[in-house]
Every structure is written in C-alpha cells, then in structure tokens.
Amino acid sequence: TVSFGIDKALEVLGVKDINEGTSTGSNNFGSGDLIESRSPVDGQLIAQVKTTTKADYNQVLETATSAFKNWRLVPAPQRGEIVRQFAEKLREKKEALGKLVSYEMGKSYQEGLGEVQEMIDICDFAVGLSRQLHGLTMHSERPGHRMYEQYHPLGVVGIISAFNFPVAVWSWNTALAWVCGDVCIWKPSEKTPLCGIACQNIAAEVFKANNLPEGISCLVNGDYQVGEFITKDKRIPLVSATGSIRMGKIVAQEVAARLGKSLLELGGNNAIIVTPDADIKMTVIGAVFGAVGTAGQRCTSTRRLIIHESIYDKVKTAIVDAYKQLRIGNPLDETNHVGPLIDTDAVKNYQNALVKVVEEGGNIVVEGGVLTGEGYESACYVKPAIAEAQPEFEIVQHETFAPVLYLLKYSGDVENAIDIQNSVVQGLSSAIMTNNLREAERFLSVAGSDCGIANVNIGTSGAEIGGAFGGEKETGGGRESGSDAWKVYMRRQTNTINYTTELPLAQGIKFDL
Ligand code: UN1
C-alpha cells in the first residue's frame, strides 16, 4: 500500500526517524531550531530537521573550502567518474527518491520519478562534459608567442533551491559544478528538507566510498536567513538561486554588493499561442499538462493561453471538457492527475487569484475551489480553474504558483499574439501551436518570443536537460543544465606564452631601455 511504500522509501534513503535532528553522519552540522517537514499529501508530520546556525555554517564552509583544495586537483575525467557513480546510486534509489519527492512535495509519483530521471540525465551529461571543458586557442599578434585560454574551477558554489523541484534543480547545478572541480553548499527549500538530506546521504556515500572529502557536497538547512549566510559570504564566488522574483532581487543585490556572481532562475508567466493552424488535440494535451501538472507549481507551468478569435470557442470547449476528466487526489495513487499544493499559504494565494480575476472583470469558465472531506485532510487540494481574462489584468501579469489558467483572445496576425505574450515582466518559457511554417518562424525570429525557451508544437513545461535552461527579464537571465551552461561554474583564464628571447610589446608599442 501507499503508506508502506513511503515508510520503506524513508528507510532506504536514511531519512526515517530523524526527529532528533539531522544527525545523518554527513557534514550536516545543524544545531539550530527545528523545522517541520509536513506532507501536503495527508498533512502528516514526516520529520523535524535541525536548522543551520551561523556557527554551524562557518564550520560547513571550512569543510567545503578544505575539500576544494583536494577536489580541484582531481583530473576532470576522474571527477566525472565520481558523478557516474552518483548516477548509478540514483538509478538504484530512483523509486524511493521519487516517492519521497511525491510525498514531501506533493507532485504525482510519475513526476517524482521524472524528476529523479532528470538527475540521472544531467549526471550522464556531466560525465561526458568532464572530458570537454574546452577553451579556445588564439593566434598571438606577436612572433614566437602562443595564446590560449583555460577553464579553472571557481571554488565553493552556493545553491539555493525551491520546493517545487526539490532534487532536480540541485543536481543540475551540482553535477556540473562537481565535474568543473567546484564544491557545493546547498540550501534546499525549508518546505522540503528531507529531499535535501536524502540526496546528501547518497552523495556522501559515493564520496566516502572513493575516499574523497565529504565537504565536496554540503547541506545547510533553514529559511532565508540561512540563505543569507550564503549570499553575503564573499568566500562563495557563485550563488545559484531558484525561486520567486522577489527573492531573486534580494539575492542578486546581496551577491552583487560583494561583486560575486549569481545565476538566477526566477518566476515565469508562460504562454502558449494557439493560432488558426494549430492541431487542437495536441494543444489540449500540451496546455492541460502545462497548466495542471505539478498542480501548476512549475516555473514553466502554462499560465496563459493566447488563442486566435477564429478558433477561440473550439479550443475553449475542448480544454474545458478535458478539465472534466481530471482526477484530483493523493499523488501517490497513479490514477490521479493532480496532487495538492505545497501548503495552505499556497492555497490562499490560489484563492486570492480567483477572487482578483473576477474583480478585474474576468469570467470563470472552470470553477475552482478547495477540496474537503476524506482524502483531502491536508487542506491543500484545489480544483484546477480556468478564467477568461484580458492580458493587461494585474493578476494575469503576476505569477500565481497554482493551477489557474487564463484564456486570452487575439485577432489578426500572429504578431499580435507575440506582443501579448511578451507584455509581461517574466521571460522564461513560451510556445506556439501551429502547422503554419511562417507563423512558427516569426515566433522564433528576432522579433518573436523574448523568452529563454521558445517551443513549437510542444507546451511550455518539461524542458530536456540537454538545453540551457533559464529565462530573460525578471526571470533573472541565468542558464543552468545543458549546452554551455557549465561555463558559469568556472573561471576563464587567458594565457600568453613567449618562447623567444625578445620581449615585443602588444599593439606595437616601443619601449626601449
Ligand atoms: C522548475 O520549475 O523550477 O522544464 C524547473 C520543466 C522541468 C524543470 C522545471 N524540466 O518543466
């Protein structure tokens, strides 16, 4: 049964009965106040986890700094081998970790498994990358000189991640950072601390088995105050932070104040443009999964559908019909499509959005509401809702982390739809549904979507790890995961070598002594 499954998963991951605090044997020195991990699935208290005090933090940083001195000397392909072993462990524990993600965070078990699969995929990518941390060679303007560049590790990388992808986002950062020769200090969301401890346990096991210092992977726990230890610490050259725009603005300023680097992955307000040439069946699947998957709590969730007036009614009817099929309930029960929101605060934000859209003149076409009764005791289960709205409504401009989808109508050319889609402060993911080549190319062109991700005949969520992941404008500009995102985890050094007995100066400058 489901509850046995969870118990077993906690045991396999070493996070069962840790109410004494996080004495998990790895370098997690928490001695501060307790935070509760409460499952949104059934409202049960799973465990209490000790937070990291300033003194604990300083100890963690020392462990990390000394581990870096050792790790940076390990050849990159050998670092890749360690990441390969880590991926093997993830394969072994995929079911347990997927279940914990589902139970602690509330996403469906299938999506929990999908998240662990993203971890495995990024590790495989990082293993290959460990032999490809290439720099360029250039031709010097001076005779008998050689010029090239090399990438060196940065040092200690801080990772602050959100509750909605409690394990994958860490792995995107850490798998790359590790092959790059960095060590990591991770602060997971205080809403999903067990996912953090479970991952840390797996990593610690691999480092220990290879006689490598435990400080290569470090974990700290707590709320934004613990995050501030990281953002304000000049010993941390790079801070990668995922979360709200509000949080990102604070992190960006704190890191910039000490001239550190930040990699920001903030809010989205993702739209699908549906043109007269769209395949309606594909549109429905893409839009519904995008809007209700992870209960609308992905940064890539579909928030807005921008539909051409000529097919508006047809698309609306098809989507409303699809919503009638949705089953909401325990995400560990694989027959359900939609699980709970993370907590009751998220439920309030969802309710406020539905009130606000009506106040602004919107029209609810699929009624929302909080579910009560058997199976919904956690008070976190809500009905995915749809409202017809105008693009300029304040609530439509705002990212509500819940399953609320806005239908917007456009007329005339695809340019009008692109204008609407670009008229928000966020710039993460975007999509167009069309079989018209001209429309698709205009959407992808220089005058098209202004987002970091632009898809054709695919929804807005569910990006593959092989591409660079991130967005523009207030989404923060960071890129994680595939492509050349690894470069942010390294420092580039330009080297010029003179193998002559002369010392000619660049730019032809004469300086005779
Ligand atoms: C996030 O919500 O922070 O593209 C990440 C997707 C997932 C990652 C989402 N691969 O939807």
Image: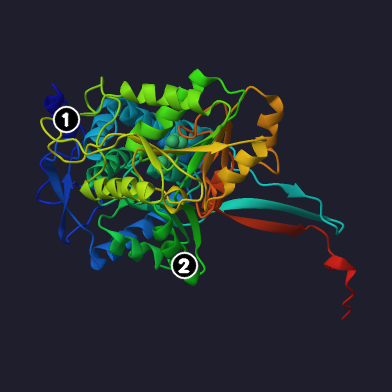
Residue 86, placed above or below residue 358? above
Tell me if 43 is positioned left or right of 314 in this view. Answer: left
Sequence order check: which comes first, mark 1 or mark 2?
Answer: 1
Residue 315 at x, y = what percent?
49, 25
Q: Is residue 441 visible?
A: yes
Q: Nearer the viewer, mark 1 or mark 2?
A: 2
Under tag 2, what secondary structure? helix
Numbered mark located on residue 253 in the image: 2
Q: Which residue is mark 1?
A: 6
Under tag 1, what secondary structure? helix
Q: Residues within 10 Å of mark 1 (few under 14, many from 20)?
A: many
Question: Which amino acid, mark 2?
Answer: Gln
Question: Which amino acid, mark 1?
Answer: Ile
**Quadrant in which residue 1 is drawn:** top left
Judge by depth and name the residue closer to the eye, 116 or 331.
331
Query: Quarter for ligand 1?
Result: top left
Q: Residues within 10 Å of mark 2 (few under 14, many from 20)?
A: some
Quadrant (top left/top right/bottom left/bottom right) for the C terminus: bottom right
**Quadrant in which residue 17 is drawn:** top left
Residue 333 at x, y = what percent?
22, 23
Residue 468, placed above or below residue 240? above
